[in-house]
Image (tube, grey):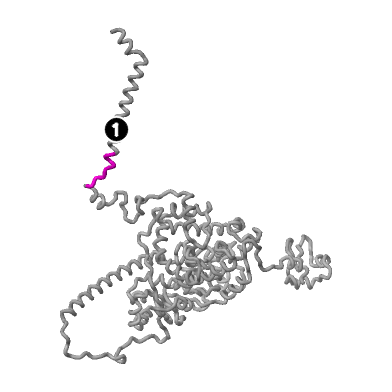
Amino acid sequence: MHRDLQTIFKPNFIKTMCLRTTTKFLTSLCLITLLALNIQAKPDTSRVDKVVTSTSPVLKNNDSFPGFPENYVPQLHEDVIKDRLSCIKTTINLTYSKEIMRWVKFYLIKNRMTTQQLLEKSSFYFPIFEAALKRHNMPVELKYLPIVESALRPRAVSWAAAAGLWQFIPSTGREYGLKQDWYIDERYDIYKATDAACRYLKFLYNYHGDWQLALAAYNCGPGRVDWAVKKAGGKNNFWKIYKYLPRETRGYVPAFIGVTYVMNYADKHNIQAKRPVPPIPSDTILVSRFVNLHHFARQIDVPFGVIQILNAHLKKNAIPNYKRNYPLRFPAHKRELIDKMRGKIIASSRSYSKRGLGYTAGYNSAYGKARKVHYVKAGESLALIALRYGTSVAYLRVWNRLRSNMVYPNQKLVIYSKPPRRNRSKLGQQFVAAVHEMNAKDKKVIKETKTATKDSKVIAKVESKPSTTPEKKVTKKEETKEALTSTPSFYAKQEKSIKGEYQQLVAQTDKDKRNEAKAKERKTSINKTLKRRKTNSRTQMVSTRYHQVMPGDTLWKITRKYKGLTIQRLKKMNNLNDRSVLFPGQKLKVSSK
């Protein structure tokens, strides 16, 4: 007994017993897991119908992308974005850089709501852009450029006075046939501005020979891009001249590439257009004299926001009285109504008074402004008073009949200041709601017409008996027509060529002809240096010599320093008279060829 106990409590015996128990436990555990896996692998055919019919609990919102829960923001990976950019088929090179990643984050993470709004508006604007780009044989991906320029806001205005979807500055807009005055600014016109932008971009591409350089020149001008190319040693590549470009232009091309990625892969990042704005096929009618858009929209039963977005270039929401045969846009499905009731519609649209436009009488700068009286205090000047009241010194002198800029304390000055601006609702917020409202009305009308046609068919079957009384044939002379306006106006044909419509809207300007000749002269290539017009800056500097006035200098002393120079000649070259005073640092022309 004692020996058996000794054998049991030996260390080797204990080790063997422990190993046996552990192996038994592990084998039993493995068997249990295998059984559990087999049970899970067997499909339960009794629940197949229930699984198919039931909706997934993760996708509560039907608008979200399959596989993503609602309000989920996927992470961004550089390798994935690089790969997706290479998959987009474009004629413009979509090269990846860190700057592009910054713009992708801006649209897909920081401003997801604005990206969703852009996707909703794109279904309205992109068909117009695509038609113009196709007509000019240009890359389709340029339709994303207005997102970078104006975020698809038709009346956007920048700090540099660039306006519209394509952000034309006033001078460039006039060169490409976009008229601008107090009542009309055709830079806001969706159709005309798009056509002008296509012509300008085509010229820039023909001039530089590269689409990325053309986009950079669209932002900062072709002259600045030429200077950057010259600084880079004639390298015709955006990324090689990157450091020589202005700061804004450096981010312009990366922003365009980032927007192109976002608009192509927004659904992969759980951003969708919940209520896309449908496109509106439009037609034009030529109208003369005053027409109020508010009443025109009411007469043809269309929301005012729709008429306003189609005629965004009419700043005062009316055609001014001095216009003749001016195109007015409206939805194409209202053409039959306007054709029948044209005279009445236009007459009722003119019923409103023209005071709503606020016509000004010639050069009267005080029209429509509040009259104020200001008493000059000690230490004040006309420039300071003009700055305070938001006017100019010239106006102050005209209003008060002042012969000079001198004012005295307690002097009475009459000032006309502008009245406070009214709170105007934004055009972008109006037209989206108006388009949805118009579509809802059209759907109701279509349903009513369908039911009416069904009822008429049923009635026609019941009343199948032929009538004994012969029907009277209505001749063309007996048909009554509405009286038209006195001005020669007509509809744009429905089945007209695409070129014909835009030739009517935007005629080819002299700038286009000059640009074609300029692009032919300038031959660009990547390996060769660019040929430019040689500016004779050095010869100009040599031909004209200047003298910097030093303390104690007089005209007589200056003429003594240069041979053949007289006092009379020095005065004539520098527009000096007997009363003019010299000051140190002043530059005077000494010789000129």
Q: Amino acid at mark 1?
A: Leu
Check disc 1: other Cα within 10 Å, few if <14, some if 14-19, many if 20+: few
User: Could you say which quadrant of the image residue 544 lies in?
Assistant: bottom right
Position of residue 297 measured from the top left corner of the image (x, y, whole percent): 36, 74
Q: Which residues are magenta?
A: 38-45
Q: Where 81 sits versus 582, above or below?
A: above
Position of residue 497 measured from the top left corner of the image (x, y, whole percent): 44, 77
Going by the image, does 386 lie left or right of 262? right
Going by the image, does 384 lie left or right of 455? right
Quadrant, the N terminus = top left
| Front one among 508 and 190 | 508
Residue at 79% of width from left, 73% of height from top?
568
Position of residue 581 measured from the top left corner of the image (x, y, whole percent): 73, 66
Residue at 17% of width from left, 86% of height from top?
466
* Residue holding disc 1: 31
Q: Where 333 sits versus 28, above or below?
A: below
Disc 1 on helix, strand or loop? helix
Going by the image, does 465 lie left or right of 305? left
Position of residue 392 measured from the top left corner of the image (x, y, whole percent): 56, 68
